[in-house]
Image (spheres, grey):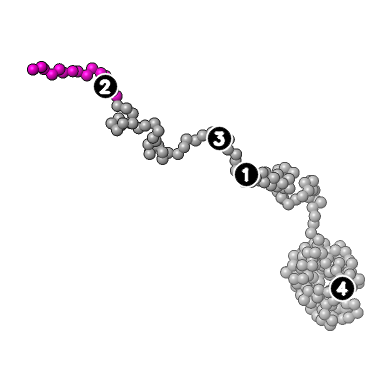
Amino acid sequence: MSTPEHTHDTSTPTAPQQGSCCSGSTAPSEIPPQVAREMDEPTVADSPAPIGLVIAFILLGFWGGAYLTEYNGGFRKDVFNHQQKSWVPVEASAAKKKDPAALGKKVFTANCVICHQTTGLGMPGLYPPLAGSELVLGQGYNDHQLILILLNGLNGPIKIKGETYNGAMPAWKDSLRDDQIANVLTYIRQEWGNSAAPITTEAVAALRGKHGTRAEAWTDSELKATQSTR
């Protein structure tokens, strides 16, 4: 009986092929789920900016230029009035002053219009007219007498434009400042066809100081006896 021959395989073992179930590795064509969930790597591209954003920046630039042109203040550090159109230096003495007659009209409307009316004609038999009044225009009277009436009032008869009025006008020295009295007198001397010189605040202040202790209203005869302080 012959003995079985034992043959030995001397060939080199073959390594497992990639992708086989026994290799435990992943084929290059397959991407693990963990990697697939990641975002793409940032890349450098020449994609244009949104057209809306470009237009917005252009409009903003135009607006900024127009704003600076209108309100640059001459690029002077001492300018604060953004509505000033002319940047030529203005002397303080040349600054525009408010019209005393316009200010006086406000005082008249608030305090005098009830009696003397917007027309300046007063009320017949009750309140004398201011339009064409001898007292207002300084015909037979002077401006300091007109001021005294505003300060202390007037009581008793007085003849204006040929008609006698016998009433009482209240004092305003405790209600109106010197400038307000000057302004309202300037207004009535230049309104309703009247034409007379304005009354100054200094003139009112001087007469207030001279007759400040007087408490009674003036009478027509007392006014005519006073002396001008000008």
Mark earlier in primary sequence (1, 2) = 2
Instruction: Rate crowding at label 1 as few (under 14), some (14 to 19) or many (20 or more) other CA atoms within 10 Å.
Output: few
| Residue for badge 3 | 45
| Residue for badge 1 | 51
Front label number (1 vs 4): 1
Residue furthest to the bottom: 125
Instruction: Determine whether label 2 and label 3 are within 8 Å by CB.
Output: no
The answer to whether any part of residue 83 appears in the image is yes
Label of residue 13 in the image: 2
**Cα gap from disc 1 to disc 2, whole angstroms:** 66 Å
**Cα gap from disc 1 to disc 4, whole angstroms:** 72 Å
* Residue nearest the viewer, comparing 194 with 174: 194
Instruction: Determine whether label 4 and label 3 are within 8 Å by CB.
Output: no
Front label number (1 vs 2): 2
Instruction: Rate crowding at label 4 as few (under 14), some (14 to 19) or many (20 or more) other CA atoms within 10 Å.
Output: many
Q: Main secondary structure of the magenta part?
A: loop
Front label number (4 vs 3): 3
Position of residue 138 measured from the top left corner of the image (x, y, whole percent): 89, 69
Which residue type carries mark 2? Pro
The answer to whether any part of residue 214 appears in the image is no
Instruction: Determine whether label 1 and label 2 are within 8 Å by CB.
Output: no
Instruction: Determine whether label 1 and label 4 are within 8 Å by CB.
Output: no
Which residue type carries mark 4? Ala
Q: Residue at the spot x=26%, y=19% of the render?
A: 12
Above or below, 56 relative to 2: below
The span shown in magenta is 1-15
| Element marked by disc 1 | helix
Q: Is residue 19 left or right of residue 118?
A: left
Mark earlier in primary sequence (1, 4) = 1
| Residue for badge 4 | 131
| Element marked by disc 2 | loop
